Image (spheres, rainbow, N blue to C red):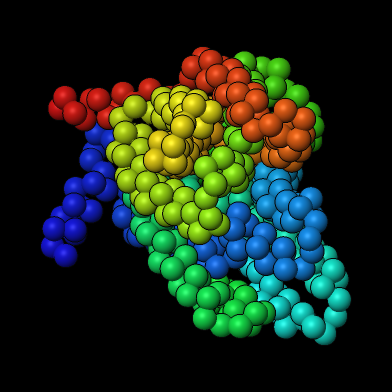
């Protein structure tokens, strides 16, 4: 424990030369611990109602339509991205963002509490009706998560200085990923040892309780009174343009070529990521595997993710987020090539490892990169645009992927994904983030 405490103190120390405002620095380590515990219990909770595994399997007990089952993760993911721009102006004007973030955090948790009721309805009403209730709760979950997401990101930008963001993101994701692994083990035990549908009810109930534990820790954030980069003098404090949402979008789009290239690259990345939904299905079909291999694939992704988050967190504050995202894109491109060329399952395992490394790098790098593309007083606007304007591609990607598989097969779909990723990588190489000169100066001093 002493070793761990010493490591934590060394890793999350803020030096005078880092030029971090006192209001941020004094609460930095408290906020690291608070947000790490919030994220860890959130990930633990998510392992009981994951939109990529648990909920689609639960939905498959209610309907035999692959299209309807596929809608569950699609509406949740798209719902998280699409609403964010509509909060940008309000978030920009708030001296403290935490109160708004907590209100949306409560609203986000309500549909997940109601989810535990659905299994009790099976046998009492038609299963198709239960599915549509699940769909409506998924839409609510996605949209409420989208409104909660921008204040959450803005709070992270305010309490974690640019010089230390990557190490926080890497550390918190390593711990949270470990919680997710523990949660997946418990979830598997519950599903296997309790009869249907009570197994799902119990799992959803555990998830709901731990989600409120997550909220308890999140509410403990200590936010500075105002954005850390805002000038104290009202005469020199940057003014936030009094545009409506669409005027603001047009103004930023026209004036910021660097941000335009980021948006196009990120949109193409979503299309290049469409192959990820078919990695396991393709492997099982191509190599004649049993369904149990899906658990092995999940384990590879989770375990690799723990290591990957640690490495990306270490590199992020040194390289900068743009280089992290660029390397992540390149690694996913390599994974797509391996998926097409692999002639044994042992080689194909590398695809899941590369996908996990890519996902971790993208989560670490992109979370920081969006915060650095515009002026700090316009950060909520940039965050909102980055999420909302690219989110529609999350809905397009599975439709395009499904059409390509039906028409041409898996390998051509992987190659089209590779083409999107190659183009996204070339564009991302032209995007500029903020130089890490403060870190270099501290290293030489």
Which of the image's four quarters has the C terminus?
top left
Which of the image's four quarters has the N terminus?
bottom left
Q: Is residue 410 visible?
A: yes
Vertical position of residue 184 compared to residue 25: above or below = below
Q: How many marks?
A: 0
In the rendered image, residue 251, in percent from the top left (x then y), is placed at 72, 23
Q: Is residue 133 visible?
A: no
Which residue is depicted at the point 71% across and 78% down?
119
In the rendered image, residue 34, in percent from the top left (x then y), is placed at 40, 62
Name which quarter of the figure residue 234 lies in: top right
* Residue nearer the viewer, 299 or 429: 299
116 relative to 220 in the view: left or right: right
Vertical position of residue 434 compared to residue 80: above or below = above
Which residue is depicted at the point 53% across and 55% down?
290
In the rendered image, residue 332, in percent from the top left (x then y), is placed at 49, 30
* Residue nearer the viewer, 40 or 74: 74
Name which quarter of the figure residue 179 lies in: bottom left
Which residue is depicted at the point 61% across and 28% down?
411
132 relative to 358 in the view: left or right: right
Name which quarter of the figure residue 162 lies in: top left
In the rendered image, residue 76, in percent from the top left (x then y), is placed at 69, 53
Which residue is depicted at the point 59% across and 58% down?
53
Vertical position of residue 107 compared to residue 245: above or below = below
* Residue nearer the viewer, 13 or 181: 181
């Amino acid at each position: 424990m002493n070793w761990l405490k010493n490591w934590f103190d060394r890793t999350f120390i803020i030096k005078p030369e880092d030029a971090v405002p006192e209001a941020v620095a004094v609460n930095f380590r408290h906020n690291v611990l608070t947000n790490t515990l919030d994220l860890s219990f959130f990930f633990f909770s998510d392992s009981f109602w994951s939109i990529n595994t648990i909920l689609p399997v639960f939905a498959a007990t209610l309907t035999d339509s692959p299209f309807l089952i596929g809608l569950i993760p699609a509406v949740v993911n798209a719902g998280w991205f699409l609403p964010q721009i509509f909060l940008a102006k309000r978030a920009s004007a708030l001296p403290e963002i935490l109160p708004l973030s907590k209100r949306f955090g409560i609203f986000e948790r309500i549909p997940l509490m109601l989810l535990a009721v659905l299994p009790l309805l099976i046998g009492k009403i038609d299963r198709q009706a239960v599915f549509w209730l699940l769909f409506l709760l998924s839409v609510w979950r996605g949209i409420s998560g989208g409104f909660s997401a921008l204040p959450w990101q803005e709070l992270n930008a305010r309490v974690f200085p640019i010089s230390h963001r990557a190490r926080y993101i890497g550390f918190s994701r390593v711990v949270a990923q470990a919680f997710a692994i523990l949660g997946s083990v418990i979830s598997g035990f519950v599903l296997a040892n309790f009869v249907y549908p009570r197994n799902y009810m119990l799992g959803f109930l555990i998830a709901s309780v731990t989600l409120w534990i997550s909220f308890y820790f999140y509410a403990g954030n200590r936010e500075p009174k105002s954005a850390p980069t805002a000038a104290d003098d009202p005469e020199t404090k940057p003014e936030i343009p009094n545009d409506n949402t669409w005027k603001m979008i047009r103004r930023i789009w026209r004036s910021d070529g660097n941000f335009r290239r980021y948006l196009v690259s990120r949109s193409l990345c979503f299309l290049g990521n469409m192959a990820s939904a078919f990695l396991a299905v393709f492997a099982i079909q191509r190599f004649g595997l049993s369904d149990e291999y899906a658990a092995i694939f999940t384990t590879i992704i989770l375990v690799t993710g723990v290591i990957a988050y640690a490495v990306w967190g270490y590199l992020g504050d040194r390289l900068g987020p743009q280089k992290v995202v660029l390397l992540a894109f390149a690694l996913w491109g390599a994974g797509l090539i391996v998926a097409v060329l692999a002639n044994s399952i042992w080689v194909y395992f590398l695809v899941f490892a590369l996908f996990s490394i890519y996902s971790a790098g993208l989560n670490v790098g992109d979370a920081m990169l969006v915060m650095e593309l515009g002026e700090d007083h316009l950060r909520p606007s940039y965050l909102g645009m980055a999420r909302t304007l690219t989110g529609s591609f999350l809905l397009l990607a599975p439709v395009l992927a499904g059409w390509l598989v039906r028409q041409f097969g898996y390998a051509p779909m992987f190659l089209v994904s590779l083409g999107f990723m190659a183009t996204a990588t070339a564009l991302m190489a032209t995007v500029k983030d903020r130089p890490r000169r403060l870190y270099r100066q501290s290293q030489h001093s």
